[in-house]
Image (spheres, rainbow, N blue to C red):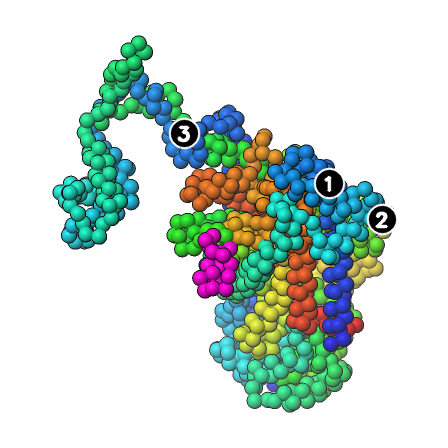
């Protein structure tokens, strides 16, 4: 267990280091660009918002929040303190809602949609990939071109196609929203049912996207493992094929877990776009409306939250991986 | 004549590629290993020696297939047996395989003892874990490994320890014969020596009765094995005692192979493997005559066209060439004089 | 080199991918030479005209008429006017007046109309039928009788002095014009989009721009990845530590999110296609760096590299002569992959509304964005988004196939 504790500690340190870097990037990048946030605010003020009191409030809050007149490092300290307090200021486009309020209502939709979908897609994709590698022959010949083609369709493409087939043509499922537009969120059955029904299309489209990539990776991994020396040796020591296949798939699966940890950032990007296609009320749609409304504070905060979520997911997967792969403990013990 | 542990008659096996082509990588090979003896098999990479090692086990899986011939282990013909019986009663029990590059021969995510449990369970499910442990401990001590290696993962072992672990596991079911296969890119010569010494030691102690050692490092064979067989393009081209094969080879291929190794000058280590110009023929369409003809210095017009039989010259020696023994020796002698 | 190329072109997968890609490239190059209209010109007044051959009505009237007695003309005319909804309504009436369902075939137009003519009675009051529904049937009946009319229509012009209509010609139901004699005919193979622009012309230009974005993004990403990977792998030490740290950092931080943040910060006015491409390139070099680094490390201590080192060759020489050739195949594959993912990244950004500024050129992503904003997918205007999706899928598919083919040539273990 000592080895594992060391591993855990390393990962924890890494998590905080990446988190710090994410903060830094989120702070610096927009400020290095021609259209920096403060300039954007001034521009907005010049355009004149319909709600003059709102503009005034935002402007005052922003000069305070950003400390625009202060030197860069003080601005950064201010920024970190604000972030830690959850104070992202007002949203431009949804005034008088605060950014925190907007994100809080969208966050759960995204978490509940994306993480189960990615995990289910990962499981199905890996099973199919392993099967393809093991059966080879016809099954593999059919599955490989199909999955190459399927993974060529970008995530938003799959989302649109599913929407058109199941939502528009067959009309089995609703095409947009997180629940029926005529409902008010409450604990009733009809609301829960509506949420479940609206969940299906975005969920399965993310699952499908994940399957494509994972199946191809798992297939190559399994073929590589099937040709490994230990397979030959185990066979010649008289071990049954079924047992050897067990070794192979366990070993092929392990790199796929680290693969998932590394790919989670990319997957989240695809899933965000899928949310937009289905107007799912998560963070993806939040970004979309924020871009339409030129809402800098909301975009900045949303991208930060998504990054933190991806880092957390990465951390959790690495921790789980440490439990599953004995080599981790062994390697750290030295 | 003493008791034959392994006797192989006219064994032929083939690979079937995904384009449904047959490649006969082992072509009518016969050999015999007696109790207490060891046989070395030599040849360039791609000559079929590793496929021969796989074929001798009597257990085939795609893309390798059995075609014809017999394998008799300790008087038991295993070539007609169904593969699950071979797996259960022959592999490990009668004939065992050692990959000499032990680095990847063990499943990296399994403790050594778990693998041994799986091996024993595959042959006799009634053995308890406690018994397995005690048995394994004994064998590990015999190869000089502490018992706590059993509780470790392969990554935690050094290269030498892994090698010993594999050897101990290979003999744990007390097989009659061991087949040690060295893939062309594996160990350095010193570690190979260590492996061979250990194997000899096991044979002397009676853990195994005979062994076959496959390598391209010929000096190694001379020191350790009693007989040597040279393979080329899936066929045996020369059979002799170790001494004769090294110092008095008959077949031009063996001559080339030995010659390139016996007189190593400083710095020529990298050159020697390419000492015979050209590459082995494509076994999808082997040449109809002598398979070495394309690369042979002494090639004659009659070499091509009709297949060349293995010529038995008595005393357990045989070679596959149309040129008579005396004539070959004269040619070699003439060449030696010219070089001096 | 020649041998490798031959081997690559013998791979079926590579060949298929290469053919698809070449086809797309050819279309992109040749089409604008043939159809020279500006791609973003608005030609349609209205949104989403369906694909088809558009024939100028005014010109048709002034073209010679030919009388053709085609047997199915009447039936086709009626069938095209009679919607599925109308057919269901007729069936509803017929069943209500007591005709059994198996005698009604909604697909058989002639029989259906005959049954309607025989059984419809505007004075009949069907029990349970609302007044609105009854009025609907009356309207349906009158439109059907118009449909069944056999007279032609008159063409009239208004006399400017008297203000009265004067007939100057007539068109009968058997009159035809020869489309090739009509001076103004426009084939809109993929109809028009929400702005009334020719989708096909737009698509071709968009494909060109998107390919350009992909190539620029791919080149930027691969160059950065290659440079950092070589540096990190070959030099080692602190340089390696720093680069590895940065690489690992950008692997876990979602690149797409960075892309969003940067694109938004750049601002609408600065966002041209090339800027977008460069930004995409700058956020997607990490995987290449990682892979190049590990390959260089495994090459670093090979005999031939050591030999060059001992011979006193410079680092640049060693990298160019002893390392690059060995990772060239990988770098090519990485480039191909980066190009296709660059195209997808652009599309993703555009869907978010962060694509290139919209006034000059279309991109595949922008076309999707417009189609989505105007809900083409909800209203069944497939021509506005499906061809775009297919184009993207074909480009990435062809590139994936080429990569798989290359992979099979260079990594034989995957072959069987």
Quickly name the residue at label 1: A38
Q: Which of the labelled discs sits on residue C187, or is there none? A: 3
Helix, strand or loop at mark 3: strand
**Depth order, front residue of C248/B187:** C248
- Does the magenta-highlighted stretch encompass residue C92? no
Name the residue located 59 percent from the left edge and 30 percent from the top edge: C360
Above/below status of B250 relative to C10: below
Residue farthest to the top, as pictured = C161
Q: Earlier in the sequence, mark 3 or mark 2?
A: 3
- Residue numbers of the magenta segment: A178-200
Residue C183: give x, y in percent of width and height.
Answer: 37, 20
Quickly name the residue at label 2: C311
**Depth order, front residue of A295/C183:** A295
| Label 3, label 2: how far apart the Cα atoms are | 68 Å
Name the residue located 61 percent from the left edge and 38 percent from the top edge: A50
Q: Nearer the viewer, mark 1 or mark 2?
A: 1
Is residue A327 at all visible to an observer of this figure? yes
Q: Nearer the viewer, mark 3 or mark 2?
A: 3
């Amino acid at each position: 267990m000592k080895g594992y504790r060391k591993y855990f500690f390393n990962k924890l340190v890494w998590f905080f280091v990446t988190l710090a870097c994410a903060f830094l990037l989120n702070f610096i990048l927009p400020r290095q660009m021609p259209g920096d946030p403060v300039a954007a605010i001034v521009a907005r003020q010049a355009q004149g918002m319909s709600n003059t009191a709102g503009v005034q409030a935002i402007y005052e809050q922003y000069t305070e929040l950003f400390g625009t007149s202060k030197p860069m490092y003080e601005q950064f300290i201010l920024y970190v303190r604000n972030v830690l307090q959850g104070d992202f200021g007002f949203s431009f486009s949804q005034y008088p809602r605060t950014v925190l309020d907007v994100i809080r209502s969208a966050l759960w939709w995204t978490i509940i949609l994306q993480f189960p979908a990615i995990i289910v897609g990962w499981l199905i994709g890996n099973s199919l990939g392993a099967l393809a590698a093991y059966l080879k022959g016809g099954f593999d010949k059919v599955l490989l071109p199909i999955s190459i083609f399927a993974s060529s369709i970008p995530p938003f493409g799959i989302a649109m196609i599913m929407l058109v087939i199941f939502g528009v043509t067959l009309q089995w499922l609703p095409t947009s929203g997180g629940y029926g537009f005529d409902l008010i969120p409450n604990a009733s059955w009809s609301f829960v049912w509506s949420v479940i029904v609206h969940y299906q299309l975005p969920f399965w489209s993310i699952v499908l996207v994940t399957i494509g990539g994972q199946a191809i990776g798992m297939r190559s991994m399994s073929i590589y493992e099937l040709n490994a020396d230990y397979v030959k040796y185990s066979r010649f020591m008289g071990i049954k094929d079924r047992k050897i296949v067990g070794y192979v798939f366990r070993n092929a699966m392990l790199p796929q877990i680290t693969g998932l940890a590394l790919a989670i950032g990319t997957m989240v990007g695809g899933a965000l776009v899928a949310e937009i296609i289905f107007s799912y009320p998560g963070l993806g749609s939040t970004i979309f409306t924020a871009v339409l409304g030129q809402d800098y504070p909301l975009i900045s905060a949303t991208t930060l939250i998504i990054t933190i979520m991806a880092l957390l997911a990465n951390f959790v997967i690495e921790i789980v991986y440490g439990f599953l792969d004995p080599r981790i403990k062994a390697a750290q013990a030295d | 004549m003493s008791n034959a542990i392994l006797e192989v008659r006219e064994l032929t096996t083939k690979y079937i590629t995904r384009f449904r082509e047959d490649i006969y990588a082992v072509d009518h090979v016969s050999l015999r290993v007696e109790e207490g003896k060891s046989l070395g098999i030599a040849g360039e990479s791609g000559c079929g020696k590793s496929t021969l090692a796989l074929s001798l086990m009597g257990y085939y899986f795609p893309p390798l297939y059995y075609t014809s011939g017999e394998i008799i282990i300790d008087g038991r013909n295993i070539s007609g047996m169904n593969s699950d019986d071979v797996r259960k009663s022959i592999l490990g029990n009668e004939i065992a395989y050692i990959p000499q590059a032990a680095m990847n021969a063990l499943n990296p995510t399994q403790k050594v003892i778990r693998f041994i449990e799986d091996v024993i369970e595959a042959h006799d499910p009634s053995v308890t874990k406690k018994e397995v442990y005690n048995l394994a401990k004994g064998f590990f001590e015999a190869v000089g490994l502490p018992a706590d290696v059993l509780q470790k993962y392969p990554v935690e072992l050094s290269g030498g320890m892994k090698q010993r672990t594999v050897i101990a596991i290979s003999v744990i079911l007390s097989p009659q014969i061991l087949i040690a296969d060295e893939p062309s890119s594996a160990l350095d010569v010193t570690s190979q020596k260590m492996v061979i010494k250990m194997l000899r030691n096991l044979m002397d102690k009676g853990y195994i009765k005979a062994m076959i050692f496959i390598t391209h490092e010929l000096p190694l064979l001379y020191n350790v094995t009693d007989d040597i067989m040279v393979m080329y393009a899936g066929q045996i081209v020369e059979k002799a005692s170790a001494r004769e094969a090294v110092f008095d080879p008959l077949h031009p291929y063996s001559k080339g192979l030995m010659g390139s190794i016996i007189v190593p000058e400083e710095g020529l280590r990298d050159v020697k493997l390419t000492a015979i110009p050209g590459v082995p023929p494509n076994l999808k369409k082997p040449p109809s005559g002598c398979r070495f003809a394309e690369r042979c210095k002494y090639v004659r017009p009659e070499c091509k066209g009709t297949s060349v039989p293995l010529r038995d010259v008595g005393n357990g020696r045989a070679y596959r060439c149309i040129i008579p023994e005396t004539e070959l020796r004269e040619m070699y002698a003439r060449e030696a004089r010219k070089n001096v | 080199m020649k041998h490798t190329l031959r081997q690559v072109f013998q791979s079926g997968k590579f060949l298929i991918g290469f053919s698809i890609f070449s086809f797309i490239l050819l279309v992109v190059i040749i089409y604008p030479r043939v159809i020279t209209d500006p791609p973003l010109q608005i030609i349609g007044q209205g949104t989403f005209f369906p694909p088809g051959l558009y024939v100028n009505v005014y010109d048709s009237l002034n073209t010679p008429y030919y009388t053709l007695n085609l047997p199915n003309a009447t039936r086709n005319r009626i069938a095209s006017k009679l919607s599925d909804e109308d057919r269901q309504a007729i069936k509803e009436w017929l069943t209500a007046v007591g005709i059994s369902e198996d005698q009604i075939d909604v697909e058989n137009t002639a029989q259906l109309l005959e049954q309607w003519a025989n059984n419809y009675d505007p004075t009949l009051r069907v029990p349970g039928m609302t007044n609105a529904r009854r009025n609907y049937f009356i309207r349906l009946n009158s439109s059907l009788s118009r449909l069944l009319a056999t007279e032609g229509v008159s063409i009239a012009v208004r006399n400017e002095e008297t203000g009265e209509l004067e007939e100057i010609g007539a068109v009968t139901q058997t009159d035809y014009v020869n489309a090739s004699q009509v001076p103004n005919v426009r084939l809109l193979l993929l109809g028009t989009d929400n702005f009334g622009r020719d989708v096909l012309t737009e698509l071709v230009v968009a494909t060109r721009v998107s390919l350009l974005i992909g190539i620029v993004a791919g080149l930027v990403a691969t160059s950065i990845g290659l440079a950092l990977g070589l540096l990190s792998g070959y030099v080692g030490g602190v340089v390696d530590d720093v680069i590895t740290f940065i690489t690992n950092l950008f692997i876990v931080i979602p690149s797409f999110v960075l892309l969003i943040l940067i694109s938004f910060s750049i601002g609408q006015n600065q966002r041209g296609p090339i800027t977008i491409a460069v930004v995409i390139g700058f956020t997607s070099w990490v995987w290449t760096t990682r892979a190049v680094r590990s390959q260089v490390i495994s090459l670093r201590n090979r005999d031939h590299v050591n030999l060059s080192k001992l011979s006193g060759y410079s680092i640049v020489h060693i990298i160019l002569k002893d390392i690059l050739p060995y990772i060239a195949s990988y770098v090519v594959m990485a480039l191909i992959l980066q190009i296709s993912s660059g195209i997808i990244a652009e599309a993703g950004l555009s869907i978010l509304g962060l694509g290139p500024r919209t006034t000059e050129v279309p991109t595949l992503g922008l076309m999707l964005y417009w189609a989505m904003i105007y809900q083409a997918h909800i209203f069944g205007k497939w021509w506005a988004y499906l061809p775009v999706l297919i184009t993207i899928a074909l480009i990435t598919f062809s590139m994936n196939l080429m990569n798989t083919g290359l992979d099979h040539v260079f990594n034989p273990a995957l072959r069987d």
